[in-house]
Image (spheres, rainbow, N blue to C red):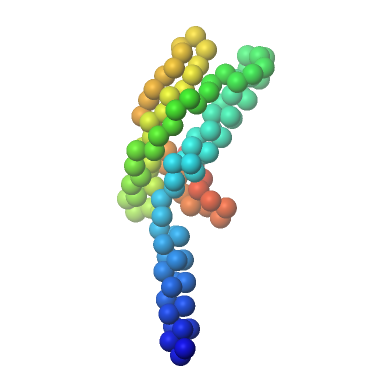
């Protein structure tokens, strides 16, 4: 019983460190990318004066994430397919630079 407190402290410390060092999941990156697409759609809607979704993500896949030199940021490569009017489906590999913010992962411009 006297070892319970030190074991609990070590366990909790490892959880905190693990939580700080993890990279974003595919779902977290997808949500960030989807927000970026949403903003692009809103801007295009205002310019074109047309309602509706202009760009639509149909496939999203996280490839990998790597630490950016001398920074806490990560550069994550994704493979994404976006449907666009007149162009159809466009598949590209893109980079998303992300950082851990107070309320989760954020895109870094």
The residue drawn where x is 48% and y is 52% is: 100
Q: Is residue 20 above or below residue 43?
A: below
Q: Residue 96, position in %: x, y? A: 42, 38
Q: In this view, does 108 lie above or below 91?
A: below
| Identity of the residue furthest to the front in this view | 1
Residue extending farthest bottom:
2
Residue 31 as seen in the image, left or right of residue 25: right
Q: Work out whether 30 lies above or below 50.
A: below
Residue 21 visible within the image: yes
x, y percentage for residue 60?
44, 32
Count of numbered labels shown in the rendering: 0
Nearest the eye: 82 or 41: 82
Across and down, in percent, residue 85 comes to: 52, 12
Task: Give the residue drawn at x 45%, y 66%.
Answer: 15
Name the side, left or right, on which 74 lies relative to 32. Answer: left
Q: Is residue 108 visible?
A: no
Residue at the top extreme of this rendering = 86
């Amino acid at each position: 019983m006297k070892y319970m407190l030190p074991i609990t402290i070590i366990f909790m410390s490892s959880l905190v460190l693990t939580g700080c060092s993890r990279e974003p999941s595919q779902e977290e990156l997808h949500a960030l990318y989807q927000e970026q697409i949403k903003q692009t759609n809103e801007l295009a809607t205002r310019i074109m004066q047309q309602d509706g979704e202009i760009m639509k993500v149909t496939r999203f896949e996280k490839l990998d994430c790597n630490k950016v030199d001398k920074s806490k940021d990560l550069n994550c490569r994704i493979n994404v397919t976006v449907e666009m009017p007149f162009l159809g489906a466009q598949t590209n590999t893109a980079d998303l630079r992300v950082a851990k913010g107070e309320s989760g992962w954020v895109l870094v411009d």
